[in-house]
Image (cartoon, grey):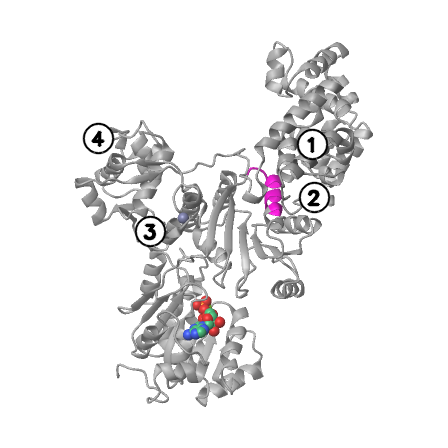
Amino acid sequence: MTDTIDLVDSELSIQDALHKYFGFKSFKGEQETIIESILHKRDTFVIMPTGGGKSLCYQLPAIMSEGTTLVISPLIALMKNQVDMVRGYSSNDDIAHFLNSSLNRSQSKKVKEDLRAGKTKLLYVAPETLTKDSTVEFFKELNISFVAVDEAHCISEWGHDFRPEYRRIRDMLDNIQEDIPIIALTATATPKVRADIIKNLKLKEPNTFISSFNRHNLYYEVRPKPTREATIRNIVQFVKGNEGKSGIIYCLNRKTTEEIAETLQVNGIKAAAYHAGLDSGTRTNVQDHFLMEEIDVIAATIAFGMGIDKPDVRFVLHFDVPKSLENYYQETGRAGRDGLEGKCISYFSQADINKLDKFLRDKPVKEREIGGQHLLEVVGYAESGTCRRQFLLHYFGELFDKKKCEGMCDNCANPKDIIEGKLYMQTALKVIRTLGEQFKLKYLVDFLIGKQSQEVISFRHDQKEGFGVGKEKNKLFWSSVLRQAMLKDYVCKEIENYGVLKLTDKGHAFIDKPEVVEIVLNHEFKEGDAAIIKPQRTVALDPVLVKMLRDLRKQVAKEKQLPPFVIFQDASLNDMATQYPTSVEEMANIVGVSKGKALKFGRKFLALISQYVEDNNIEKPNEIITKQVANKSKRKVYIIQNIDKKISLQTIAEGQGISLDELFEEIETIVASGTKLNIDYFVNDYLDEDQQEEIYDYFMEADTDDLDLARKELDEEYSLDDLRVVRVKFMSELAN
Ligand code: ADP
Ligand code: MG
Ligand code: ZN
């Protein structure tokens, strides 16, 4: 065996071949060295971001070589596309073929003829195809130059797209021909996945080429996700503020994609939903319209975006948290491929994580472990108080100096407080050492704060020196320190036992000779986080106007002899000070304001806002008006109709499959947005007339509609439910 592959034309340089076969002037990145490596029959491993030009790394040497190159690729759907691309560069179609289950008999016969005749340079196969005995026998007849394993991360259970058949590739190849050189390529691989690929394909001392994963033009941000409605509203506002630009919104379920697409549509955005539940004709249509820019925004489940190459996607939003950072990176990677603007914003709530966690509980142990670890990383990313780009790149094994982010993530744009953490860092690293470098982050934190968890007790570590050494600080603090330790490369995750933290040489050195180190406190998203989403720059809450609106409300309340909250609720005033409504129509789109209410109380407020807008030369945020989708209110209509019929609330709740509590929330929203509901028949069951009057009078005098306060003021005589019921009656009668 020689140490280079036989070439079709040994006179032709790689450079000339590039020009001759592909018409490109120069190589991108490390393509040339990569091609040399495989032509020298060296196992080669290429990690290069999407769009980096991986295909050429095997296509060009394939065409230059004697024999046929096998290209293993996971997606049958994309094979045809890739074959067409290669054929596009050549004058004959025989140069590339694919062999898979989609071919009929005569088609696969033709492919085999071309292969036997030596006409075909590139043969795309799915790993399943390789496992067929007849195929293997056939391949034995061929002269195979080398094998390219594309999307090689599919080999690892720790990657984002595991295909079990990928694990059998090596055995199959050994069956076909001895010592076939392999080039493996992927766009995402954590250090763990990389190790899996090398091990599983048995790559022999591979030449490894890792390009930087940094996408300098992508802006990363994480926003809290308070409620579904508020989040959709925020998305609509964002899209409105970016009208005419292409974007993708990823969601986990089909219903959400449809809800978001519809809400965008009624708000005048050209949007569509895309998910696996649509028939393939519709899906292709949506995709084509997106490419043709007849649709600007797609709300999609993860099924969308694979293999489509639209260079000017300007934003990628994640309504739901991704399952892993690989997924996240892959999906956000579809933004700004042309090197221009690409905003990547994800909405995060601990409740979403808990939901995903629950799904995992029914999975086999291994899958659960991997899934759980991935979720922890996602949480780590969301909570990170430090540069998001640094965090993401570190996840893929790349050290990145956050100064180079240049404000291109929310944390760099608005830096958090930094504390000097030399001694804390030393303490944390010492604990890792004391415990023999055998534990994961969560355990280390428990040990540091002195939490007697079951696990800690089972290791008898509560007796160990150093247990609780960091108890004056909390969990969040110590996980921030440990995260920082990873980013600074004092600590690394073990490859074999994924998630276990080990000290690096740098970490050991730090313990002996600690240096000044900055620690940024992470952000904690609590379950049911009520945090209001930070208004975007274009739609910021105007504090001056809020104050003016409040004063006006007080004045109007006095005139009408009503409590202020009956006029407009705080949320409504805040929304007005964000959207600047200047007409009744616009006012009717403010949170908690119906047309009726806008007409009844809105006049003075509109006058004030119009004046304010004029005086201050305010540009309204692109008519950001989030309209609700009509059929979303089906439930509300049902409730209103049934209350009109005096049906018992219990029965209504059952009819909608919701709790009485939830029903009450619905009723409150209905009333708050201006619809009168007569619930006397219900209130009378609860309380006698005198009681009702007492509570009613209280609200009449009160400054706020707060229930707890009401309870206290009324000497705890009534339950919260009593008060709530009367409050609804009160609001319904006076505010509407
Ligand atoms: P990847 O598989 O890494 O995502 P592709 O192989 O699909 O990327 O290549 C992305 C784009 O870059 C393709 O349009 C390809 O034609 C182009 N490309 C690759 N190499 C070069 C080159 N040397 N010069 C110019 N364009 C290139
Ligand atoms: Mg590719
Ligand atoms: Zn940053």
User: In the figure, is residue 606 to the left or right of 153?
Assistant: right
- Three-letter code for the amino acid on which mark 3 is drawn: Asp
Please give the residue where the numbered disc 1 appears in the rendered image. Answer: 608
Q: Earlier in the sequence, mark 4 or mark 1?
A: 4
**Residue that badge 4 annotates:** 465
Magenta stretch in the rendered image:
226-237
Q: According to the image, label 3 marks what residue?
A: 401
Q: Nearer the viewer, mark 1 or mark 3?
A: 1
Q: Is residue 549 left or right of residue 500?
A: right
Labels 1 & 3 near each other (Cβ < 8 A): no
**Is residue 231 on the magenta stretch?**
yes
First along the sequence among labels 1 and 3: 3
Identify residue type, mark 2.
Lys
**Residue at the left extreme?**
512
Quadrant (top left/top right/bottom left/bottom right) for the C terminus: top right
**127 vs 231: above or below:** below
Give the residue number, with chain letter if any, for mark 2: 627
**Nearest to N terminus: mark 2 or mark 3:** 3
Q: Main secondary structure of the magenta part?
A: helix
- The kind of residue tagged 1 is Leu
For marks 3 and 4, the one nearer the N-term is 3
Name the front one of labels 4 and 1: 1
Q: Earlier in the sequence, mark 2 or mark 4?
A: 4
- Secondary structure found at label 4: loop
Residue 507: percent from left, percent from top: 23, 45
Mark 2 lies on a secondary structure that is: loop
* Residue 612 rendering spot, x and y as whole percentages: 65, 35
Q: Position of residue 337 (x, y in %)?
A: 49, 62
